[in-house]
């Protein structure tokens, strides 16, 4: 009877893993499809503007093409789940023009970062951005560790620096909160603002409990960052 119970438990456990994987794959496929559809709509808009020889078509500023653009905003609304999809499309493209620049802008907007602010991470073309972005991802775990463990910085300074790392740092900051560094929780609050699914409470009381209950929501984001460590 005991052996049967163990086999049943293992069977159910394996089934739950398979179901989770299938659900995640379907979710990823849905995100990719939405990204594809919106990028296609943006590209179609650009083609029409070029055909019309409009004022927009004469612009050399990529940001002009996504200003007040509904399809671009729909991509941003997809949130962090869209980051690996956008990154993959950028990496796979052999071109380095406007159509690649727009996903790069979208990645920065979703991740709440401005890589051009620092001289070491400035970029001009989409392929420049791809290199800078990969280096940024690889550095996040160690950078979060260095900031949180810094004994010179005040809590406010730590939070500010963590926020500048963007949404990719969220799961790693949460790890620190869970291990009793609750003073950096305001960084999680700031970075989860407008998150489509999980928003941290403004009140820092009970921060550790909230992190423990919600950290699984950021597992895919964490895995995306960790995958870059192996490349």
Image (spheres, helix red, strand yellow):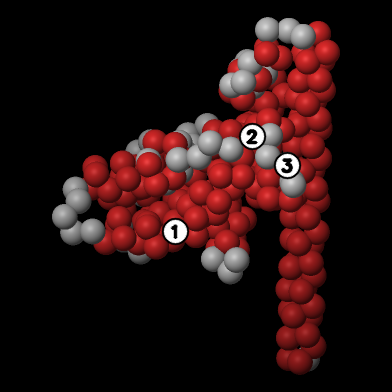
Cα distance, mark 2 to mark 1?
23 Å
Measure the alpha-carbon separation of dots 3 and 1. 26 Å
Q: Return the x and y of residue 119 as percentages of the image width and height.
A: 38, 42
| Nearest to N terminus: mark 2 or mark 1 | 2
Quarter of the image containing the C terminus? bottom right
Q: Going 50% across and 55% down the picture, which residue do you hit?
A: 135
Marked residue nearer the N-terminal end (2 or 3): 3
From what the image shows, is residue 220 above or below residue 79? Answer: below
Whether pointer 2 and pointer 3 mark residues with C-beta atoms closer than 8 Å, the reply is no
Which label's residue is closer to the chain start, 3 or 1? 3
Q: Counting other residues with Cα less than 10 Å from the Cα at mark 2, is it few (<14), some (14-19), or many (20 or more)?
A: many
Q: Quadrant of residue 128?
A: top right
Q: Nearer the viewer, residue 187 or 95?
A: 95
Q: Nearer the viewer, mark 2 or mark 3?
A: 3
| SS type, badge 1 | helix
The mark closer to the camera, 2 or 1, is: 2
On the image, the x and y values in percent for residue 25 come to 78, 55
Inspect this view and state whether residue 159 appears.
yes
Residue matched to label 3:
95
> Quick one: 3 or 230, which is closer to the camera?
230
Contact between marks 3 and 1 (CB within 8 A): the answer is: no
Q: Residue furthest left?
A: 152
Residue with the mark numbered 1? 139
Q: Residue at x 54, y 66 (%)?
A: 229
Which quarter of the rendering shows the N terminus? Answer: bottom right
Asked if residue 85 can be seen in this view, the reply is: no
**Residue at x 51% of width, y 49% of height:** 132
**How far from the left and from the top, in percent, is residue 40?**
81, 30
């Amino acid at each position: 009877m005991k052996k049967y119970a163990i086999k049943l438990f293992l069977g159910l456990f394996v089934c739950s893993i398979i179901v989770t994987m299938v659900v995640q794959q379907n979710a990823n496929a849905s995100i990719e499809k939405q990204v594809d559809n919106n990028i296609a709509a943006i590209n179609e808009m650009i083609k029409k503007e070029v055909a019309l020889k409009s004022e927009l078509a004469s612009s050399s500023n990529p940001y002009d093409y996504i200003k007040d653009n509904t399809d671009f905003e729909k991509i941003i609304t997809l949130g962090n789940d869209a980051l690996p999809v956008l990154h993959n499309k950028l990496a796979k493209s052999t071109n380095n023009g406007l159509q690649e620049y727009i996903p790069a802008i979208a990645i920065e907007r979703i991740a709440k970062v401005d890589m051009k602010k620092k001289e070491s991470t400035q970029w001009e073309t989409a392929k420049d951005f791809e290199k800078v972005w990969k280096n940024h991802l690889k550095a996040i775990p160690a950078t979060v560790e260095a900031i949180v463990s810094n004994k010179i910085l005040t809590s406010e300074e730590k939070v500010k620096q963590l926020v500048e790392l963007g949404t990719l740092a969220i799961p790693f900051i949460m790890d620190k909160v869970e291990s009793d560094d609750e003073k950096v929780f305001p960084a999680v609050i700031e970075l989860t603002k407008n998150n489509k699914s999980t928003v941290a409470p403004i009140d820092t009381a009970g921060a550790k409990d909230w992190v423990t209950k919600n950290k699984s929501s950021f597992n895919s984001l964490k895995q995306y960052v960790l995958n870059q460590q192996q490349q």
